[in-house]
C-alpha cells in the first residue's frame, strides 16, 4: 500500500532540486541505507520517547506523523476493560437479571463449568434468595457469556479452557428470555 | 487584575525591538502628561496596538511600558527575563511559550530546554505580586512549581499547556500554598501522575477558585474533597474533571455548581445507575449558563441524550474524546442550534458531518480528529464529501482542522468557495504523498484555491502530494498568512523560495521532510528577522549553509540539533529565531548555536 514518499526524505549529496518532479508514491522496498532512517522511519518505536504508542503492524511508521498529540492516541484504548487479566487471575464481570449490583469472579479459581456454576450460585444466593440447579438449564436462569467477538453464547458448549480465553463477561439471564438459535 | 475580564485573542507582546533604536523624540507634539496617557493606554490590550504605541515617541514608549500589565512572550529565547523586567516594571500576568511546535510530535529531543525556572527566579524579584502565569511547551519541574507557590503571595492563575517535566507533587505545592488561587488549568502535559491526592491539598479556606481543569490527569482524586471544593467555591465557572469521575459523581457536582459555564465531564457511561437517567437530564437542564461541554468519554446513545437540555445555548462542544457514530452525532446536533465550535472524532463519518451541515448554521470552527491515526488499512473516517457537506451548511466556517485519508482538489475548491472567510485552514491527509485520489494529480490546485479564495487566511497546514506549484501559489496569494506548516512536500528549493519571497506577514514557518536546501534557506535572509521562528527538519540543509546564515544575520540564533545517525555535514534539525538575548546559555550538548 502506498505509504511514504521515501525519496523526498532521502539524504543526498547531490544538488538540491535534482529530485524527480513527480515523486513516486509506491512504497519502495529498494529503500536503502538511509543514514537518517532511524529518526524519520522507525520500524519500532523504541527510538523515540513516546512509549504509549502501540507497535506498528508490518509497515514502517514515520515519527511524528500524522501530527497527532500523544494524549489523543490513547483515547479509544483507554476504555475500561471488562476483563482485566492480572498476574494471578482472570476477573470478569457477572451480572444477573434483577440484581442491582454486578459482581466479579476470578475464572482461574475454577477448574470446570460445574465449579463455576456452584461459585455463581453461592455468590448470588445471598441476593436473590433461592437459586435453582443449573444442570440442563431447566432452571429459572441460564448462564450466558459474551465472547471475544461480542456475541452472547450459552455457557457450556466449548471446552473449559477455550471458554477461559474467550469469555469476556457473564450474564445470568432469565431462561424465558433465552432464544434458542 | 479583574480575572473576569474577557481575554482577547491578541494580547500584549514583547517586541524584540531594541529600545534604543526607537525614535527618542520628545517634542511638543506629544502634549499629554503621563497622568493622562497612562490611563488611556491601560485600556489597550492588543499586543499589536501596544507595540505600535510604543514606537510613536519616547514619551509614549515610556507611558506604554509603565501601563502594561500583561506581557506575552511567544518564544522564551527571543528575549531574556532581565530585559523583560527591565522594560516593564508593573507586570501582573506573563504568558510564555517555549519549544517549537513540532515538539508535540516528538521531533524535539528531551532536555532541549525552555526551562521556566530561570524566568521564575527573575520574575520573583521584579514582580513579587505576579498574579498569572500561562505556559505553553515549557519545561516545568516540581521545583519550579514549588518556587512559584512559595514566592508569589498574590498568585491567582496557573495555566500549563503541553508542558512537561513535572509531577502531581508540583500541583500539591500549588494547591497547598496559593491562598488566592482562582485558576488551575492543566492541559495535555507530559506529567508524571503519581496520584490524585494533590486535589486534597486545597485548604478548606480556599473559596476563590473559578477555573479548575484536571481532565488530562489519570489518577483518581478524592471525590468528597472535590465535592467540598466545588461547593465552597461559589464563583466556579469552569470545571473539567478527569475520566475517573463517574456519572453519579458528576451529577452531584452539577447540583453544587449549576452556575458553570464550561463543563468537562468524566466517563459518560456506567453499568449501573443508582438514580435514573431522567434525573441526570434534569440536572443538565438546571445548568442554565453552560456554553461549553467536553469530556464525554465512553459515551453512547444511552447516556448522551442526558445533555440535550443543555444543548440549546452551547457554543462549543468538544466530542474529541467520544467515539460517536454518525447517527449519535446527528441526534445530538439537532439540539445544538447555537453551536459555534465543534470538535469530533472521525468515527462520525461523512454522514455525521452532513448532520453538522444541516443543524449548525452558525458553526465557525470544526476540528475532526482521527480516532485511529496509525491504522493504515481498513480505515473509515471522513472523506472529501463530509468536508463539502459541512461547507454547504456552515457559511461562517473560518477555522478547520481536518484529518482524512483521501481528498480531491475539486472538493477543496468547493469548500473554500462556500466558505471564503477561512482564517485557519489545516488539512491533514494522513497518507503521505497522497494525490487527488480521483484525478491522481498533486493537491496543488486545492491549496491554490484556498489561498486565492480566502484573503483573510492566517494559518495554513498543507498535506498530500505537493509540488513547488503549491508554494508558488502560497507565496503569490497568501498576503495575510502568518503560520505555515509543511511536511513531505515540494520538489525543489524553488518551493521554499516562493514562500520566503512572498507572504509578507509570515511569522512562523515549520517544515519537515522537504527537499529544500541551502540556497532556499539563504534566499530568506532578510525575512527571518521579521519572523518569530523557522523550523526545518529532515530537509537538505548542511552545516555550511547554516553557518553562512548565522554569519550574515547576527541577530538570529541559528541552532542545529545534531542527530547521531546523520552525517556531520548535514544539518538534520534546524531551528532559527530572532532574538535580542544572544545565543542560548542553557543549550544542551546536542544543540549547536552557529
Image (cartoon, rainbow, N blue to C red):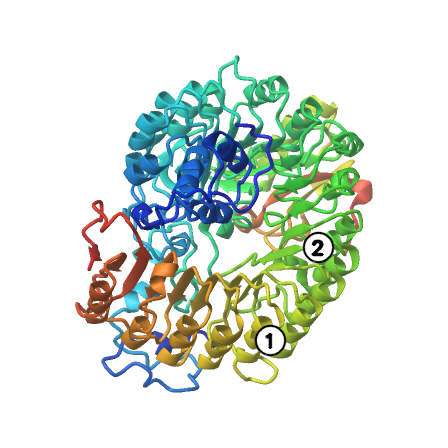
Residue B438: x %, y % from top left: 61, 82
Nearest the viewer among B581 and B354 is B581
Frontmost residue, B121 versus B263: B121
Quarter holding residue B259? top right
Instruction: Judge whether B183 appears above or below B84 on screen.
Output: above
Q: Residues within 10 Å of mark 2 (few under 14, many from 20)?
A: many
Q: Which mark is residue B449?
A: 1
Question: For the residues marked 1 and 2, what is the alpha-carbon distance in whole angstroms?
Answer: 22 Å
Quadrant of the image occupied by residue B330: bottom right
Q: Is residue B45 above or below residue B472?
A: above
Residue pictured at 63% horizontal, 53% vertical? B344
Say left or right for A66 vs B385: left
Tag count in the figure? 2
The correct choice, above or below, for B216 with respect to B509 in the image is above
Q: Which residue is at the far front?
A: B28
Q: Secondary structure at mark 1?
A: helix
Circle 1: is it few (<14), some (14-19), or many (20+) Cα within 10 Å? many
Element at badge 2?
loop
Amino acid at each position: 500500500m502506498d505509504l511514504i514518499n521515501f525519496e523526498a526524505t532521502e539524504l543526498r549529496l547531490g544538488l538540491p532540486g535534482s529530485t524527480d518532479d513527480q515523486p513516486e508514491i509506491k512504497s519502495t522496498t529498494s529503500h536503502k541505507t538511509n543514514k537518517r532512517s532511524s529518526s524519520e522511519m522507525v520500524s519500532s518505536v523504541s527510538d523515540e520517547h513516546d512509549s504509549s504508542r502501540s507497535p506498528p503492524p508490518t509497515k514502517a511508521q514515520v515519527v511524528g506523523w500524522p501530527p497527532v498529540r500523544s494524549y489523543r492516541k490513547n483515547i479509544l484504548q483507554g476504555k475500561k476493560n471488562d476483563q482485566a487479566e492480572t498476574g494471578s487471575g482472570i476477573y470478569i464481570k457477572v451480572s444477573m437479571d434483577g440484581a442491582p449490583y454486578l459482581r466479579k469472579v476470578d475464572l482461574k479459581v475454577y477448574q470446570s463449568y460445574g465449579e463455576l456454576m456452584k461459585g455463581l450460585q453461592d455468590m448470588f444466593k445471598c441476593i436473590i434468595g433461592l437459586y435453582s440447579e443449573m444442570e440442563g438449564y431447566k432452571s429459572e436462569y441460564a448462564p450466558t457469556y459474551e465472547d471475544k467477538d461480542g456475541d452472547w453464547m450459552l455457557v457450556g458448549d466449548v471446552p473449559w479452557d477455550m471458554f477461559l480465553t474467550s469469555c469476556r463477561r457473564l450474564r445470568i439471564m432469565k431462561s424465558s428470555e433465552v432464544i434458542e438459535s | 487584575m479583574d480575572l473576569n475580564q474577557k481575554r482577547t485573542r491578541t494580547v500584549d507582546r514583547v517586541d524584540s525591538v531594541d529600545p534604543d533604536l526607537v525614535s527618542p523624540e520628545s517634542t511638543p507634539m506629544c502634549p499629554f502628561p503621563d497622568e493622562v496617557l497612562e490611563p488611556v493606554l491601560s485600556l489597550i490590550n492588543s499586543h499589536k496596538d501596544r507595540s505600535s504605541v510604543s514606537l510613536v515617541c519616547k514619551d509614549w514608549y515610556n507611558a506604554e511600558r509603565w501601563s502594561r500589565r500583561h506581557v506575552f512572550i511567544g518564544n522564551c529565547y527571543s528575549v531574556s527575563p532581565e530585559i523583560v523586567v527591565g522594560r516593564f516594571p508593573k507586570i501582573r500576568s506573563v504568558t510564555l511559550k517555549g519549544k517549537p511546535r513540532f515538539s508535540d510530535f516528538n521531533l524535539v529531543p528531551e532536555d532541549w530546554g525552555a526551562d521556566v525556572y530561570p524566568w521564575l527566579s527573575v520574575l520573583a524579584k521584579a514582580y513579587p505580586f505576579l498574579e498569572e502565569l500561562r505556559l505553553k511547551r515549557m519545561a516545568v519541574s516540581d521545583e519550579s512549581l514549588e518556587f512559584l507557590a512559595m514566592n508569589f503571595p498574590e498568585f491567582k492563575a496557573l495555566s500549563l499547556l503541553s508542558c512537561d517535566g513535572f509531577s502531581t507533587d508540583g500541583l500539591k505545592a500549588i494547591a497547598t500554598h496559593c491562598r488566592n488561587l482562582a485558576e488551575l488549568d492543566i492541559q495535555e502535559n507530559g506529567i508524571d501522575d503519581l496520584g490524585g491526592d494533590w486535589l486534597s491539598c486545597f485548604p478548606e479556606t480556599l473559596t476563590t477558585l473559578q477555573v479548575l481543569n484536571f481532565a488530562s490527569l489519570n489518577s483518581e482524586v478524592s471525590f468528597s474533597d472535590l465535592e467540598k471544593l466545588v461547593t465552597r467555591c461559589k464563583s466556579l465557572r469552569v470545571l473539567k474533571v478527569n475520566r475517573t469521575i463517574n456519572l453519579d459523581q458528576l451529577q452531584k457536582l452539577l447540583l453544587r455548581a449549576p452556575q458553570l459555564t464550561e463543563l468537562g465531564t468524566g466517563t459518560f457511561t456506567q453499568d449501573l445507575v443508582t438514580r435514573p437517567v431522567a434525573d441526570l437530564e434534569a440536572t443538565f437542564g438546571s445548568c442554565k449558563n453552560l456554553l461549553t461541554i467536553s469530556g464525554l468519554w465512553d459515551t453512547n446513545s444511552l447516556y448522551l441524550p442526558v445533555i440535550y437540555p443543555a444543548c440549546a445555548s452551547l457554543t462549543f462542544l468538544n466530542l474529541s474524546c467520544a467515539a460517536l457514530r454518525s447517527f449519535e452525532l446527528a441526534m445530538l446536533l439537532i439540539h445544538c442550534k447555537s453551536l459555534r465550535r465543534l470538535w469530533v472524532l472521525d468515527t462520525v463519518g461523512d454522514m455525521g458531518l452532513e448532520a453538522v451541515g444541516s443543524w449548525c448554521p452558525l458553526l465557525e470552527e470544526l476540528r475532526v480528529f482521527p480516532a485511529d491515526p496509525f491504522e493504515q488499512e481498513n480505515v473509515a473516517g471522513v472523506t472529501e464529501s463530509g468536508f463539502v457537506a459541512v461547507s454547504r451548511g456552515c457559511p461562517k466556517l473560518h477555522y478547520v482542522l481536518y484529518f482524512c485519508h483521501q481528498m480531491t482538489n475539486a472538493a477543496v475548491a468547493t469548500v473554500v468557495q462556500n466558505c471564503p472567510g477561512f482564517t485557519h485552514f489545516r488539512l491533514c491527509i494522513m497518507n503521505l504523498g497522497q494525490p487527488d485520489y480521483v484525478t491522481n494529480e498533486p493537491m496543488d490546485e486545492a491549496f491554490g484555491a484556498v489561498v486565492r479564495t480566502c484573503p483573510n487566511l492566517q494559518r495554513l497546514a498543507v498535506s498530500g502530494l505537493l509540488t513547488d506549484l503549491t508554494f508558488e501559489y502560497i507565496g503569490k496569494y497568501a498576503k495575510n498568512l502568518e503560520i505555515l506548516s509543511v511536511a513531505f512536500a515540494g520538489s525543489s528549493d524553488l518551493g521554499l523560495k516562493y514562500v520566503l519571497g512572498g507572504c509578507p506577514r509570515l511569522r512562523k514557518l515549520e517544515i519537515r521532510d522537504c527537499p529544500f536546501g541551502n540556497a532556499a534557506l539563504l534566499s530568506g535572509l532578510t525575512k527571518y528577522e521579521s519572523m518569530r521562528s523557522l523550523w526545518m527538519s529532515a530537509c537538505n540543509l548542511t552545516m555550511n549553509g547554516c553557518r553562512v546564515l548565522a554569519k550574515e544575520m547576527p541577530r538570529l540564533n541559528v541552532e542545529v540539533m545534531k542527530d547521531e545517525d546523520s552525517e556531520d555535514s548535514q544539518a538534520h534539525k534546524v531551528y532559527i529565531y530572532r532574538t535580542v538575548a544572544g545565543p542560548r546559555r542553557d543549550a544542551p550538548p546536542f544543540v549547536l548555536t552557529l
